[in-house]
C-alpha cells in the first residue's frame, strides 16, 4: 500500500511542476504597448511577506510557508516602455 501512496505523491508533484511551467509560459511577460516579449526585469520589490504554518509537513511536523507579494518592473527593449506586474510567490 505504501509504495502506491509514494508513487501517487511523486506523480502529483510532477503534474504540479509541469502545470507551473505551462502557466509560467502562458503568463510570460510582454509589453502592453507593443506586445513584444523582448522585455527584461529592471526591478523587483517585495511589497508584502506573509508567514503561515502548514501543519503535518514532512518529517518533523509543521513547516513554514512564506508567501511574498512581489512587484516586478519590466523594460521593453522594443519600444522603451516600462511596466510593472505584481505576482505572488510561495516559498516552503
Ligand atoms: Zn514595447
Image (cartoon, grey):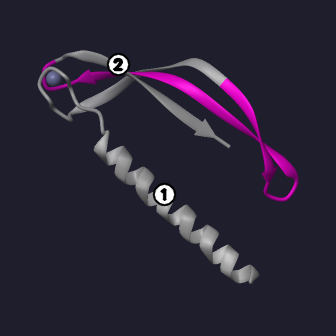
Quadrant assignment for the C terminus = top right
Q: Earlier in the sequence, mark 1 or mark 2?
A: 1
Q: Residue furthest right?
A: 60
In the image, what residue occupies the spot 56% across and 62% down?
A: 13
Q: Residue 32: which quarter of the image?
A: top left
Where ligand 1 lies, by quadrant? top left
Q: Position of residue 14 (x, y in %)?
A: 51, 65
Residue topped by disc 2: 84
Q: Horizontal placement of 57 versus 17: left or right?
A: right
Q: Secondary structure at mark 1?
A: helix
In the image, what residue occupies the spot 50% across and 57% down?
A: 16
Q: Position of residue 46 (x, y in %)?
A: 55, 20
Cα gap from disc 1 to disc 2, whole angstroms: 25 Å
Q: Please, is residue 44 above or below residue 90 in the view? A: above
Q: Please, is residue 38 above or below residue 12 in the view? A: above
- State whether label 1 is within 8 Å of ligand 1: no
In the image, what residue occupies the spot 72% across and 29% down?
A: 51
Q: Residue 53: which quarter of the image?
A: top right
| Magenta-tinted stretch | 50-79
Q: Residue 38: which quarter of the image?
A: top left
Q: Is residue 7 magenta?
A: no
Picture disc at residue 17: 1
- State whether label 2 is within 8 Å of ligand 1: no
Amino acid at each position: 500500500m505504501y509504495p502506491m501512496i509514494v508513487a501517487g505523491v511523486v506523480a502529483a508533484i510532477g503534474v504540479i511542476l509541469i502545470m507551473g511551467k505551462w502557466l509560467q509560459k502562458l503568463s510570460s511577460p510582454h509589453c502592453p504597448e507593443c506586445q513584444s516579449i523582448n522585455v527584461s526585469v529592471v526591478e523587483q520589490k517585495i511589497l508584502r511577506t506573509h508567514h503561515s504554518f502548514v501543519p503535518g509537513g514532512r518529517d518533523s511536523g509543521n513547516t513554514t510557508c512564506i508567501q511574498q507579494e512581489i512587484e516586478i518592473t519590466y523594460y521593453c527593449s522594443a519600444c522603451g516602455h516600462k511596466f510593472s506586474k505584481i505576482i505572488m510567490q510561495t516559498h516552503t
